[in-house]
Image (cartoon, grey):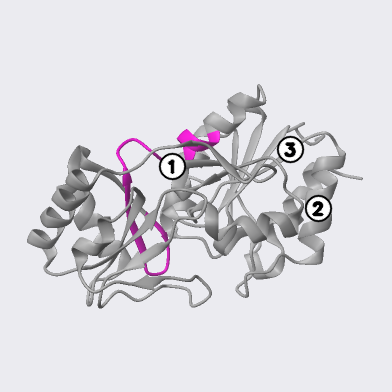
């Protein structure tokens, strides 16, 4: 069969387009260039906040929008500004944290501040899941709320990510959206905000619909994006929850899984 003419390619970064060393392979770069040459668009859809993707987008030659912060931010790389953002208010964030700790005991928290220069702040005990991601340690939890935030980061000293995410979803309710986006990365973001809401907003700017979109990911936070897009491609080592809803499974991020599919969908 001839490839479907997708006009939008949405890719997660960590565990998907990026290799473990935070780089994009030459093969993946060439495949993305083929997408753009064909007249389609490439859209980064990531859990990372805007300040943590600025240099990566520049390396990829992205000059348009990117969905950041699990859908809480629509960042324009060309003008280095947020086209849209939504913040998580302190009251629901603290209430959600209190409910989670009442259920599972003490958790360690961090936050991503809103804005193009927002910092990642972490309280004592919190350990960043990736050493390449910078963070500023604060003395007390109340110091996390010194500026508007896009999301809360959670770690538990004993529970697995799956156990913590399940427990959080069971008690948070409508206070926030609970996501799991990678090893050691359980997060709270504004209620109703997901990668799908950010993807839909970016696509609408270009007049592109779900039926024209193919999405790539590896973790449960990509499930809403897969459900929105016409075709969802999971990486070989993706989380079981994402594999269960994927339309296709490709190679791992270390083995150029995104490129392998794009070369088929956008033949030269």
| Residue under label 1 | 72
Residue at image location 27% in from the left, 61% down from the top: 144
In the rendered structure, which disc, 1 or 2, sits on the residue that comes first in sequence? 2
Q: Are marks 1 and 2 in contact (CB under 8 Å)?
A: no
For the residues labelled 3 and 2, the Cα–Cα distance comes to: 12 Å
Instruction: Assess disc 1: are there few (<14), some (14-19) or many (≥20) residues with their C-alpha within 10 Å of its C-alpha.
Output: many
The quarter of the picture where the N terminus appears is top right
Using the rendered image of the protein, determine whether residue 17 is visible from the camera's viewpoint: no
Q: Taking 166 as reference, is 18 left or right?
A: right
Instruction: Assess disc 2: are there few (<14), some (14-19) or many (≥20) residues with their C-alpha within 10 Å of its C-alpha.
Output: many
Is 187 one of the magenta-colored residues?
yes
- Classify mark 2: helix, strand or loop: helix
How many badges with numbers are in the image? 3
Q: Taking 171 as reference, is 203 left or right?
A: right
Residue at image location 33% in from the left, 35% down from the top: 192
Is 189 one of the magenta-colored residues?
yes
| Residue under label 2 | 31
- Classify mark 1: helix, strand or loop: loop
Using the rendered image of the protein, determine whether residue 183 is visible from the camera's viewpoint: yes
- Residue lying furthest top in this view? 207
- Residue lying furthest left in this view? 102
Q: Does residue 99 sit above or below 67 in this rendering? A: below
Q: Which residues are magenta?
A: 180-199
Q: Between 43 and 169, which is closer to the camera in this rendering?
A: 43
Q: Between 144 and 255, which is closer to the camera in this rendering?
A: 144
Q: Between 257 and 62, which is closer to the camera in this rendering?
A: 62
In the rendered structure, which disc, 3 or 1, sits on the residue that comes first in sequence? 3
């Amino acid at each position: 069969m001839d490839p479907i003419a997708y006009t939008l390619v949405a890719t997660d970064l960590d565990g998907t387009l990026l290799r473990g060393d935070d780089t994009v392979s030459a093969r993946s770069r060439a495949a993305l260039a083929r997408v753009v040459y064909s007249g389609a668009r490439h859209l980064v859809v990531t859990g990372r906040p805007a300040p943590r993707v600025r240099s990566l987008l520049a390396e990829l030659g992205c000059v348009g929008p990117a969905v950041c912060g699990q859908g809480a931010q629509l960042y324009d790389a060309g003008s280095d500004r947020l086209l849209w953002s939504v913040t998580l208010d302190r009251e629901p964030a603290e209430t959600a944290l209190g409910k989670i700790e009442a259920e599972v005991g003490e958790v360690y928290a961090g936050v991503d501040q809103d804005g193009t220069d927002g910092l990642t702040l972490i309280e004592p005990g919190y350990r960043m899941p990736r050493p390449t991601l910078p963070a500023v340690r604060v003395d007390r939890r109340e110091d996390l709320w010194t500026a508007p935030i896009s999301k809360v980061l959670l770690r538990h000293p004993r529970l697995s990510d799956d156990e913590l995410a399940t427990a959080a979803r069971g008690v948070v309710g409508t206070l926030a959206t609970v996501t799991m986006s990678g090893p050691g990365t359980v997060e709270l973001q504004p209620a109703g905000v997901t990668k799908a809401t950010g993807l839909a907003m970016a696509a609408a700017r270009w007049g592109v619909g779900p039926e024209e979109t193919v999405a790539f990911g590896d973790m449960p936070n990509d499930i809403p994006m897969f459900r929105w897009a016409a075709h969802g491609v999971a990486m070989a080592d993706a989380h079981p929850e994402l594999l269960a809803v994927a339309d296709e499974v490709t190679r791992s991020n270390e083995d150029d899984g995104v490129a392998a599919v794009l070369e088929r969908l956008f033949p030269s």
